[in-house]
Image: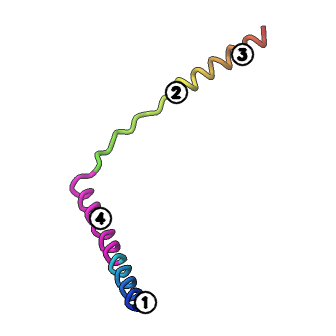
Amino acid sequence: MLEKGLFLMVIGMGVTFIFLGILIYIVLGTSKLIWKFFPEPEEPVTPSRVSTADTEIAIAVAAVTARLHK
């Protein structure tokens, strides 16, 4: 009885492993197929600007420097 249980367990685990392997390849193939026909549009590169946080920090440093040199 124990041998039949172990045999059934090994068969079940093997079938599950094979099914999951096939599923992985199906998902990867579908993904490549979708990206081939519907590529992601490329966004134009915009020049980076100085962020407002950098500007605020520069203003604060200038204010502290001016206050110290008074």
- Select label 4 or label 3 by which is in front: 4
What amino acid type should be assigned to the residue bearing mark 2? Ser
Most foreground residue, 27 or 4: 4
The image quadrant where one finds the N terminus is: bottom left
Q: Does the stretch in magenta take in 36? A: yes
Tell me what residue is drawn at x 41 percent, y 92 percent. Answer: 3
Q: CA distance from mark 2 to mark 1?
A: 70 Å
As helix, strand or loop, the secondary structure at mark 1 comes to helix
Residue 9 in the image: state x and y as whole percent.
39, 82
What amino acid type should be assigned to the residue bearing mark 4? Val
Tell me what residue is drawn at x 58 percent, y 26 percent. Answer: 54
Q: Which mark is residue 27?
A: 4
Circles 3 and 2: CB atoms closer than 8 Å: no
Q: Across the whole image, how many numbered discs are drawn on residues?
A: 4
Q: Which mark is residue 51?
A: 2
- Select label 2 or label 1 by which is in front: 1
Q: Going by the picture, which residue comes out furthest to the front? A: 1
- Select label 3 or label 1 by which is in front: 1
For the record, the magenta segment spans 18-39
Residue 69 in the image: state x and y as whole percent.
78, 11
In the depicted structure, whether residue 3 falls above or below residue 64? below
Most foreground residue, 42 or 1: 1
Q: Can you identify the residue that label 3 sits on?
A: 64
Q: Earlier in the sequence, mark 3 or mark 1?
A: 1
Residue 44 in the image: state x and y as whole percent.
34, 39
Q: Going by the picture, which residue comes out furthest to the right? A: 69
Q: Earlier in the sequence, mark 3 or mark 2?
A: 2
Q: CA distance from mark 3 to mark 2?
A: 20 Å
Q: Can you identify the residue that label 1 sits on?
A: 2
